Amino acid sequence: MIVVTGATGNIGRPLTQALAEAGEQVTAVSRHTAAVPDGVRHVVADLAEPAGLRPALEGAKALFLLLSGDLHATGAAPADIIGEAASAGVRRVVLLSTLGVVTRPFGQTRMAMRALEDTLRESGLEWAILRPGGFASNALWWAESVRERQVVAAPFGDIGVPVIDPADIAAVAAACLLEDRHTGGAYELTGPEVITPRGQTEAIAAALGTPVRFHQLTREEAKAAMSRSMPAELADDTLDILGSPSPAESRVSPDVERILGRAPRPFADWAARHVAAFR
């Protein structure tokens, strides 16, 4: 049995589906009750309280660990999740980390994630670490303005990074959970090409078959908008990357193709599959 945390999100949902279709018994973990594929067991648990995972981990051979905001929740001890997994007899953990632990290692979030990576490496369990960069699904931030005004408003319109389709992260995670040959690897996951916000706007317009205008925000305007849904420090951190990506953050990694035997999907493919969100 394989346990998938964050099972109802952009990565966990396709991962759960892929594992179920591969004939695996799957336990899907999420903070709230949610629909899961037929035959998949669902457990409600809060990862900020690692002991609450014990019922989900009983009988599990592998765990996909996606922490999201649980990494910094009050009283959170994410390293204890690794201990709970080991105590339950889990043999393998695939951890969703971030490319930032390599490219910008000194921010609070990345230091905490790197510490969790180190805990996993030292746990005695089999492990694989996934380090994606920017997500194609972040374009959903623009969905409302595209639906209502046919406009994408974003900063740094002509500065790009190789965003990755979350479905490709899920496919890599499935391979790492199911195949021994990926154990002990830390994989940098990107899309196949650098794409700018202006280029993403063009791809969304092509998927819709209607014009979408790009409106460039100043950094200050973007920070004000982002700070409504995230801490100001994190907004600044994100804008630093978007506005001035390092060579490592702009690099197209070969790791998705090495693991899956195919190139990662371009942003245009993601936009076409999610076009309903922009209509």
Image: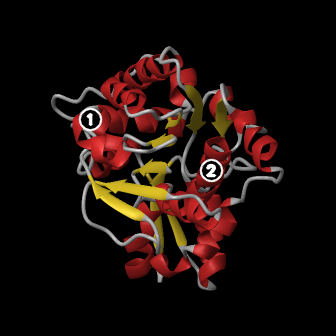
Q: Residues within 10 Å of mark 2 (few under 14, many from 20)?
A: many
Whichever of callouts 1 and 2 sits on the residue coming sooner in the sequence is 1
Residue 11 vs residue 225, the one in the foreground: 11
Examine the rendered structure and indicate whether residue 110 appears above or below residue 167: above
Examine the rendered structure and indicate whether residue 220 appears above or below residue 237: below
**Which structural element holds mark 2?**
helix
* Residue 160 visible in the current orientation: no
Residue 51 vs residue 8, the one in the foreground: 51
* Residue 246 visible in the current orientation: yes
* Mark 1 vs 2: CB contact within 8 A: no
Q: Residue at x 65, y 54 (%)?
A: 171
Q: Position of residue 88 (x, y in %)?
A: 38, 34
Amino acid type assigned to the residue bearing label 2 in the image = Ala
- Which residue is denoted by mark 2 in the rendering? 174
Amino acid type assigned to the residue bearing label 1 in the image = Pro
Q: Position of residue 276 (x, y in %)?
A: 50, 81
Q: In which image quadrant can residue 80 be found?
A: top left
- Mark 1 vs mark 2, CA separation in Å: 23 Å
Residue 42 vs residue 95, the one in the foreground: 42
Examine the rendered structure and indicate whether residue 114 appears above or below residue 96: above
- Which residue is denoted by mark 1 in the rendering? 50
Q: Is residue 18 left or right of residue 220?
A: right
Q: Residues within 10 Å of mark 1 (few under 14, many from 20)?
A: some
Q: Residue at x 37, y 22 (%)?
A: 112
